[in-house]
Image: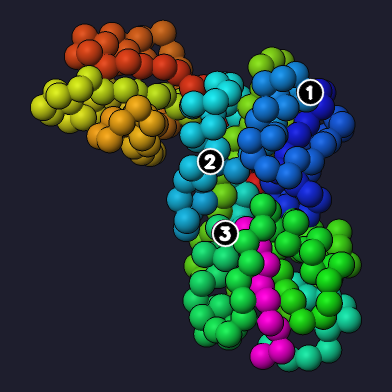
Amino acid sequence: MGSIGYLGPKGTFTKLAVDSVFNGGDKHSFDTIPECIDAVGNDQIDIGVVPLENAIEGTVQLTVDYLVHQVRLPVIAEIVVPIQQHLLVNKAFTGDMGDIKEIHSHSHAIAQCHQFIHKYLPDADINFTTSTGRAAELVGSGDGNIAAIGNKLAAEEYDLQIWKEDIHDYPNNHTRFAVIAKDESLVQLNHQVNTEKTSLLITLPSDYAGALYQVLAAFAWRKMNLSKIESRPMKTGLGNYFFIVDVNQPFDDVLFPGVKAELEALGCKVQILGTYPVYEIKL
């Protein structure tokens, strides 16, 4: 097992994902997603685990854009983790809900708990942090009138009190985490594979009427099920986009080469971002 990097510090959902599927290995936390990805690209660590998409808030665009535009690394596996957000306070806090003056957490976590905050903490100042773990760390070392939104692992790591459990707005809240590595053989996960998936990056030809329709048709008539299609800017000018397409099956030597050839005949560019197992964690 190689060294493993994750979006830290301790107590993040990314760390929870890492602990759920990796036995052993040196584990290193990074303050930001780009730092973790860069560490894999620079061979500082062997494996990186970064958040990819949340069921409520959608794609973590920083992860996708950085992997596409900055450090192109293959996705080796995907980990799906149920997300349970709690309101965490310092154990020195003895007031009530109305005494909380500040709420700290990652922007996605804040958004996942918007209705709770609006109803119970409308006057509290919102402070965004690089991760839920970092928010818990701040509350653990701060005064009693601030709170964090995070998980039970964060409460344990920073000796916090769970003031209110399950404050997320929707019960079916999951996050997908991408496992990235240059050497696939170093990735050894101790969990049952639920399914397999292939992700592609497709760039459409410019000024081609009906191009997206023909892209989708290339998958449809082969009865290949797409679980996701998302456009992102190429960063080369207004109106220039690429598409990330997730196909719910592993890469093979018949269907995928056929799709690639058909799309390239239309003038599209097609790259395989990864074909990988998906691990769904039950907490």
Q: Position of residue 26 (x, y in %)?
A: 87, 31
The circle drawn on residue 62 is 2
**Which residue is at a point 49% across and 26% down the rendered structure image?**
69
- CA separation in Å, label 2 and label 1: 21 Å
Q: Position of residue 152 (x, y in %)?
A: 76, 63
Q: Earlier in the sequence, mark 1 or mark 3?
A: 1
Identify residue for label 3.
Answer: 107
Range drawn in magenta: 98-107
**Which residue is at a point 55% across and 70% down the rendered structure image?**
113
The image quarter in which residue 137 lies: bottom right
Q: Earlier in the sequence, mark 2 or mark 1?
A: 1
Side of 115 where 6 appears, left or right: right
Identify residue for label 1.
Answer: 44
| Residue placed most toward the observer, 83 or 116 | 116
Instruction: Estimate how packed mark 1 is, as few (under 14), some (14 to 19) or many (20 or more) residues with alpha carbons within 10 Å.
Output: some
Q: Secondary structure at mark 2?
A: helix
Q: Secondary structure at mark 3?
A: helix
- CA separation in Å, label 1 and label 3: 28 Å
**Which residue is at a point 55% across and 53% down the rendered structure image?**
174
The circle drawn on residue 16 is none
Does residue 249 show up?
A: no
Side of 146 where 274 appears, left or right: left
- CA separation in Å, label 3 and label 2: 12 Å
Report if residue 201 lies within the magenta region.
no
Does residue 40 show up?
A: yes
| Residue placed most toward the observer, 229 or 149 | 149
